[in-house]
């Protein structure tokens, strides 16, 4: 009875993100009573702090200790690892969703919302009463007890995505190293995590693509100020008078540029941006 009360207190502390308090209680139970559920609790405690300095190696160590104490419960312990890892990764996906909304990536945010809604904790994992106290964490809703302070503190969207991607991969590899890959639970876990990783990788590519697109569509004078030296400004302004066309031997286009100030500024603007990006096929005034 006393052990059950201590497990309840530890779980409450974990839900409240008082990780050291929870770990101390679990450790006392693990040491005094050789409790597999206590080692499970320590493992979950560390798993929920994956972005705060804890590692999957520590998590796997704790789950292995629990399996060694109760080998007959290996399958249930594996399922607990899968279930709690999904809770953590689902929480990380929600952080990305919130960041996408903040950065006005509405389409991506909507896709993530649909993805998160589609991710499920494997049915039946929570049925074993041997681990009902710790298992209840996953049943109270995604994100309960999961540490996200460092993620919320990241102001750079690109850095956030890369960090989450690293943690997703670390968690996936950790679980894959321990559990039976042939089980239905692992197969569903595998599909869910790959969906999350695929989305996060897509978000990273989207950030890079948008950055490149913004660079090329910036106003000409602002773009010059940011990307060209003062000596280059004068050289590129010559595009408005068709100097580059004359140097290419295309006198007709040179005259057109000269008479129209670079085709009403549009043609000269496009040529100048290409020159800055090293994408111009003809005579680059910067070379």
Image (cartoon, rainbow, N blue to C red):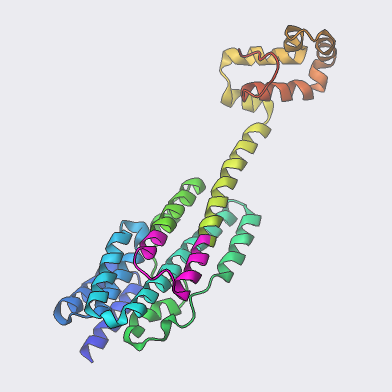
Range of magenta residues = 171-194
Horizontal side of 230 relative to 265 (left or right) equals left
Horizontal side of 160 relative to 218 (left or right) equals left
Q: 254 or 198: nearer the eye?
A: 198
Horizontal side of 86 relative to 101 (left or right) equals left
* Residue 164 shows in this picture: yes
* Residue 18 shows in this picture: no
Q: 119 or 273: nearer the eye?
A: 119
Horizontal side of 138 relative to 278 (left or right) equals left
Total number of numbered labels? 0
Q: 105 or 61: nearer the eye?
A: 61
Q: Quadrant of the C terminus?
A: top right
* Residue 123 lies in the magenta-colored region: no
Which residue shows up at 62% across the image and 66% down it?
114
The rendered magenta stretch, by its main secondary structure, is classed as helix
Q: Quadrant of the N terminus?
A: bottom left
Seen as rendered, the residue at the extreme left is 32
Seen as rendered, the residue at the extreme front is 182
| Rendering coords of residue 209 (x, y %) | 61, 41
| Rendering coords of residue 90 (x, y %) | 48, 66
Classify residue 129 by image quadrant.
Answer: bottom left
Classify residue 262 by image quadrant.
Answer: top right
Which residue shows up at 41% across the image and 68% down it?
85
| Rendering coords of residue 103 (x, y %) | 58, 51
Classify residue 74 by image quadrant.
Answer: bottom left
Which residue shows up at 64% across the image and 37% down it?
213
Which residue shows up at 33% across the image and 61% down it?
56
Question: Quick check: 267 above or below 63?
Answer: above
| Rendering coords of residue 121 (x, y %) | 48, 75
Question: Quick check: 17 above or below 137?
Answer: above
């Amino acid at each position: 009875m006393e052990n059950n009360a201590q497990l309840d207190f530890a779980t409450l502390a974990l839900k409240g993100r008082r990780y050291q308090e929870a770990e101390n209680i679990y450790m006392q139970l693990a040491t005094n009573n050789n409790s597999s559920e206590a080692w499970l609790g320590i493992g979950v405690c560390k798993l929920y702090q994956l972005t705060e300095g804890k590692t999957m190696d520590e998590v796997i160590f704790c789950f292995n200790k629990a399996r060694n104490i109760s080998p007959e419960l290996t399958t249930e312990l594996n399922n607990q690892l899968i279930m709690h890892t999904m809770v953590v990764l689902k929480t990380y996906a929600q952080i990305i969703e919130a960041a996408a909304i903040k950065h006005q990536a509405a389409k991506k945010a909507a896709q993530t919302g649909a993805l998160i809604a589609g991710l499920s904790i494997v049915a039946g994992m929570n049925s074993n009463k041997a681990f009902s106290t710790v298992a209840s964490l996953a049943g109270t809703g995604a994100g309960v007890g999961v540490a996200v302070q460092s993620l919320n503190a990241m102001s750079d969207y690109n850095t956030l995505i890369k960090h989450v991607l690293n943690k997703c991969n670390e968690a996936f590899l950790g679980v894959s190293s321990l559990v039976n890959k042939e089980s239905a639970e692992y197969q569903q876990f595998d599909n869910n995590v790959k969906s999350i990783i695929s989305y996060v990788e897509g978000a990273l590519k989207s950030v890079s693509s948008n950055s490149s697109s913004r660079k090329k569509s910036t106003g000409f004078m602002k773009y010059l100020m940011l990307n060209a030296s003062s000596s280059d400004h004068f050289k590129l302004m010559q595009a408005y008078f068709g100097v580059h066309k004359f140097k290419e031997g295309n006198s007709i286009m040179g005259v057109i540029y000269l008479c129209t100030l670079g085709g009403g500024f549009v043609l000269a603007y496009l040529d100048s941006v290409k020159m800055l990006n090293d994408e111009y096929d003809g005579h680059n005034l910067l070379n």
